[in-house]
Amino acid sequence: MKKILFVIVTLLFFPIRTHALSVTDFLIDSDIGEYSRSYPGSCPKGSGIVAGAGHFKPDHTDYACDIRYYNEVSDNGVDVQVTHHAGDDSDKWLGHELDKSFRTSLGIPGDSYGPRQINGQTVLEFGAGGREYRWLSGNNVVRIEYTDLQMEKSEPIEVVKAYLVKHPSTLTAISLLDLRSAANKTTWIKDEMDRRLCLCDKWFLQLTLKKVEEKQAYRESVKSMNIFLDYREKYYGLTAANEKNLLAGYLSTNDGTNIKLKLAEDKTWWSAHKSDGISLP
C-alpha cells in the first residue's frame, strides 16, 4: 500500500515528461551540403527574434535554438535560429511579430523587405548588408541570416531549403504588391494597436496573479500604451504628448491606479474608432 501511495504522490508532483526537448527536433545538427556545422546546436530559454517585438512570455517558456554553418569555398557563415513557442494565447500574434523589425517604427514595410517563394513555400526576406530569411512553421519561428556587406556572396539556398523541409512554412502566400498595399498596411497597423492594448491586459493579469513585480508590469504596460498613442497620433491625428507625459508621471510614482484608468480610457476609445479609416503616408 505504501508503494502505491508513493507512486501516486510521485506522479502528482513530478509528472512524467513524455517528450523532452531535443536539439534535433528543431535544428539540423550536422553538415548541410557544402555548409559544415561550426559547433553543436543548443536550445537555451528565450523568445528569439520576436522578443524585440515585445512578445509576451511571463506565462510560458520559449526555447531559442541556435546553430551556425560555414562554407569554406564562399567564406560564408550562416546563423540559424529556430524558436519553439509553447502555443499559448500570446502566440496568436507570432505571424504579426515575425516581421515587425522589417517595418518602420510605425508599421510601414521597409524597402529591402518582401515575401519570396522558395520551393512553393512563403518566406519573408530582408536583403541589405547580407540576407535574412524568416518564416513561421506552426509555433516555430525560423530565422536564417548571413552577413555580406557588398552583397556578392552566393545565397545559402541549400540551408534554407533544408530547413523548409524540416519546418515547412505555414505563412499564407502574399505578393510584394499586396504587402505594400494600403489594405495590408492598414491591417498590420490596427493589429499592432490591438496587440499593444492586449499586452497591457496580460501584464496586469500577471500582476494580479502575483507572477510579476509591480514596477515591471507598470513599465511594460506604459511602454505599450505609448506605442499605441504614437500610432493613434500618426494615423488618427490625435496629439499624444500630453497623455504620454501623464503616463510618465504615473510611472515615476508607481501609480498603478491611474495607469489602469488610462488603459481603460484608451480601450474605450479604440473600441469606438477601430473601424475608422486611417491616413497612410
Image: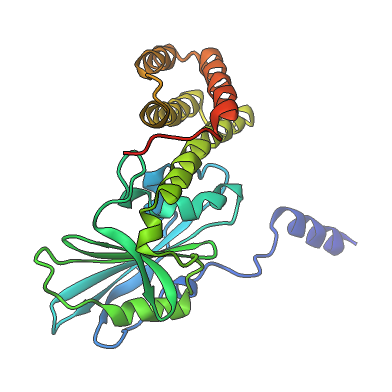
When the figure is inspected, residue 53 is found, relative to residue 9, above or below; the finding is above
Q: Residue furthest right?
A: 1
Is any atom of residue 28 visible in this view? no
Identify the residue shown where x is 54% and y is 65%.
138
Q: Is residue 233 above or below residue 211?
A: above
Can residue 32 be seen by looking at this rendering?
yes
For the point 32% across and 61% down, which residue is it? 114
* Quadrant the N terminus occupies: bottom right
> With 211 as the anchor, is 279 left or right in this view?
left
In this view, which residue lies farthest toward the bottom? 33
- Tell how many labels: 0
| In front of the other: 50 or 114 | 114
Percent x, y of residue 89: 61, 48
Q: Position of residue 277 (x, y in %)?
A: 48, 35
Q: Nearer the viewer, residue 180 or 221?
A: 180
- Residue 232 figure quarter: top left
Identify the residue at horizontal 56%, vertical 14% (top origin).
257
Q: Position of residue 166 (x, y in %)?
A: 46, 78
- Please say which color scheme the image uses: rainbow
Left or right position of 206 against 125: right
Residue 227 drawn at (x, y percent): 40, 31
Relative horizontal placement of residue 150, taking residue 111 as reference (left or right): left
At 24% from the left edge and 54% from the top edge, which residue is drawn? Answer: 111
User: Is 104 in front, or is 51?
Assistant: 104
Quadrant of the drawing holding the C terminus: top left
